[in-house]
């Protein structure tokens, strides 16, 4: 068991010091960035822990801190891409790298703590955030590509693949927490709260995720009929029309029901639904 702890510690320690080098390089670009400053502060704490000979007996906490560093650093890198409006020459490579970085905490948790569920190691909120960030990144990328009509004509299948990957991540985000079942002994005195929790809506981010899924499904339906992909590959594709319709109907019902007057607009969702249905 002691050897296993040491092996876990070495692997995580190596990644932490690699991230520290990367963070320092990025801070040279923008010293006052809040996310890089937060990442640097967490890394200093983690480096101090290892330099003092600490052993990873609290592996979950170490992995959670490591995950937060990943989230902060990649957020800075994502913002650069967005500010540059996703340059055509480098964006595909950089996006794949960001997706890999945001996938690594989940893989590392599964590898270093195989006896535990990943969500138990990282916690529900961090796991949700990892899925949300990957899905939102692909949403923003596809939103930009959607405005490049000539590019889509030449790269339609690539566009649809990005949409499918993004929708899958966002759907996984919505599935991290189980919907609150009102017949499971749960007592909620606020009927509006009970209604949205029973639909698996736990935050504004969950609602935004639903709208993102609906928009991406709309883009996919718009272009997939013209795709040159073979029938075999199309069979692996998500049922965008069905998914978009189901998710947006739930979004509209929540926004015009329990969340009415909370600032959520349903006009775009209804317009998309009129096309999907």
Image: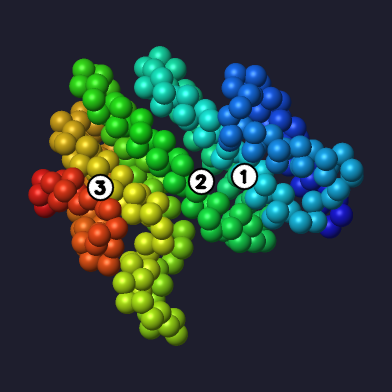
Percent x, y of residue 87:
39, 17
The residue pinned by badge 1 equals 67
Disc 3 crowd rating (10 Å Cα; few below 14, some 14-19, many 20+) is many
Residue 144, quarter of the rendered image: top left
The residue pinned by badge 3 equals 214
Mark with earlier residue (2, 3):
2
Residue 235 in view, yes or no: no
Percent x, y of residue 227:
20, 31
Q: Is residue 124 above or below residue 38?
A: below
Mark with earlier residue (2, 1):
1
- Tell which of 272 and 154 is nearer to you: 272
- The quarter of the image holding the N terminus is bottom right
The residue pinned by badge 2 equals 130
Residue 18, quarter of the rendered image: top right
Residue at 21%, 17% in the rendered image: 150
Is the residue under label 1 in contact with that under label 3 (CB below 8 Å)?
Answer: no
């Amino acid at each position: 068991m002691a050897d296993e702890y040491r092996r876990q510690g070495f692997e995580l320690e190596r990644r932490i010091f690699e991230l520290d080098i990367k963070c320092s390089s990025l801070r040279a670009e923008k010293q006052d960035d809040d996310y890089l400053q937060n990442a640097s502060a967490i890394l200093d704490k983690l480096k101090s822990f290892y330099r003092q000979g600490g052993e990873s007996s609290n592996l979950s906490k170490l992995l959670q801190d490591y995950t937060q560093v990943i989230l902060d650093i990649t957020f800075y890198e994502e913002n650069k891409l967005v500010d540059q409006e996703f340059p055509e020459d480098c964006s595909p490579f950089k996006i794949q790298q960001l997706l890999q970085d945001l996938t690594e905490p989940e893989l590392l948790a599964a590898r270093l703590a195989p006896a535990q569920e990943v969500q138990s190691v990282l916690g529900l909120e961090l796991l949700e955030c990892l899925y949300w960030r990957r899905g939102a990144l692909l949403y923003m990328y596809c939103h930009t590509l959607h405005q490049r009509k000539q590019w889509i004509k030449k790269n339609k299948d690539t566009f649809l693949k990005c949409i499918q990957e993004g929708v899958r991540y966002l759907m996984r985000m919505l599935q991290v927490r189980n919907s609150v079942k009102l017949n499971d002994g749960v007592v909620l005195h606020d009927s509006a709260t009970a209604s949205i929790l029973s639909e698996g809506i736990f935050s504004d981010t969950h609602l935004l995720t639903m709208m993102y899924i609906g928009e991406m499904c709309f883009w996919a339906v718009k272009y997939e009929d013209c795709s040159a992909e073979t029938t075999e590959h199309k069979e692996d594709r998500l049922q965008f029309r069905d998914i978009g319709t189901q998710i947006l109907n739930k979004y509209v019902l929540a926004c015009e029901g329990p969340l009415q007057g909370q600032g959520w607009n349903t006009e775009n969702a209804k317009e998309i639904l009129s096309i999907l249905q």
